[in-house]
Image (spheres, rainbow, N blue to C red):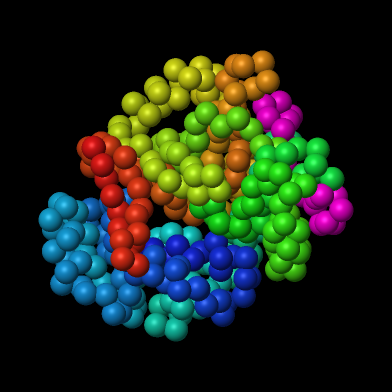
Amino acid sequence: MVDVYLFNPEHDLALAHGAHNYTAPPFARQLRHDLRLLPAWVAPAGSFIAIPDDAPIEEDRRWLLDHHLDITPVPISGIADLGPCRIHPWGWDATLRHQLMQVGVSPAYLPTEEQLDWIRRLSHRRTSIAIHQALGNAFSPCPVELTIIDDMTAFMHRHPGCYLKMPWSGSGKGIYRVIDPQGDRHVLHWIEGALRRQGSLLCEVGLDNVQDFAVECECRDGKTLLTGYSVFDSDFHSQFATGRVGPREELHQYLLNRYPALDHVVDRVLLVLDSMVATHYNGPLGVDMMLYRADDGNLALNPCVEVNLRMTMGMVTAAMGDRHGLRGRFSIVSDNSRYLVSLSM
């Protein structure tokens, strides 16, 4: 059985839509086309990578060879011709399942509708609330889920600098940072649109962010296995900006030096994920965390900013550093309406 990897960055948007007929916006389609080979860094040698049918396959073959990646590109319409396969997309959703069935991939190689329902349910940001509560709310302020605009307005005025987050969104999309609730003329319009589309918002106290990072995992047969760490920086809107590329132990030690109790907390989070997520899901999972400056001036830990039941940019940077021996700063840049991966040393 062969392994096939596929980049579908519109996954979080498709989850928000919920049905199988989602059409991604132009920027997401462009991102999917331009960064189609991104999972090659994560894929084991000998795997296949599915690319859009209109992508230049010979050019992609040369790129993979030039980067010493033993991965074979195949058009999405050609996946079914590979025979029995394990498909590893960026993330599973009903739209992708429908697209793959349309090109002849057998349902036997795809998740069931029940499995997709669990992925969507657990990808809701309220999962982060459940993890905070399972940890005893002992580390950082717990987000709250609200459905009434007046309650959100009261929260914003109590906590200037807070974040409002749509239940299903990723990589900084669907997040609104409220600096000045009194003078922000756009926030109520944004809230109304978000409630109309998704029904609720997660409201979080703004913290004095010192370092974003993530614990990268794999859920398999009811267990959550730690596979690596990623250290990254976010922009003003909490969108991924740059990621540090280096060996796993180096990243781990960097985090331990700043927060010595990290391993103990991670072990507790993994146990929570075993019972809460891994009983319903097999696949990659990333838990975004944050070191922040507490009121007493010491570093504190937010053990769950969000949970991603999919591959992440952090998994790519972790593989680049740990498996491929690269070092530097990873970022995605836009150049003349094209998206490019940059690794600066």
Q: Does 326 sit above or below residue 266?
A: below
Quadrant location, the C terminus = top left
Quadrant location, the N terminus = bottom left
Q: Residue at x 62, y 71 (%)?
A: 17
* Residue positioned most to the front: 183
Residue 178 shown left or right of residue 254 in the figure: right
Regarding residue 85, the answer to whether it shows in the image is: no
Residue 328 shown left or right of residue 298 in the figure: left
Q: Does 323 sit above or below residue 262?
A: below
Residue 199 shown left or right of residue 283 in the figure: right
Out of 235 and 245, give the one closest to the viewer.
235
Q: Which residues are magenta?
A: 135-153
Q: Position of residue 147 (x, y in %)?
A: 81, 57
Out of 232 and 5, give the one closest to the viewer.
232
Q: Does 80 sit above or below residue 6?
A: below
Q: Position of residue 48 (x, y in %)?
A: 27, 64
Out of 216 and 109, give the one closest to the viewer.
216
Q: Does 142 sit above or below residue 197?
A: above
Q: Position of residue 254 (x, y in %)?
A: 40, 23
Residue 315 shown left or right of residue 62 in the figure: right
Q: Residue at x 71, y 44 (%)?
A: 180
Residue 236 image-quadrant placement? top right
Q: Position of residue 332 (x, y in %)?
A: 36, 53
Regarding residue 306, the answer to whether it shows in the image is: yes
Residue 306 image-quadrant placement? top right
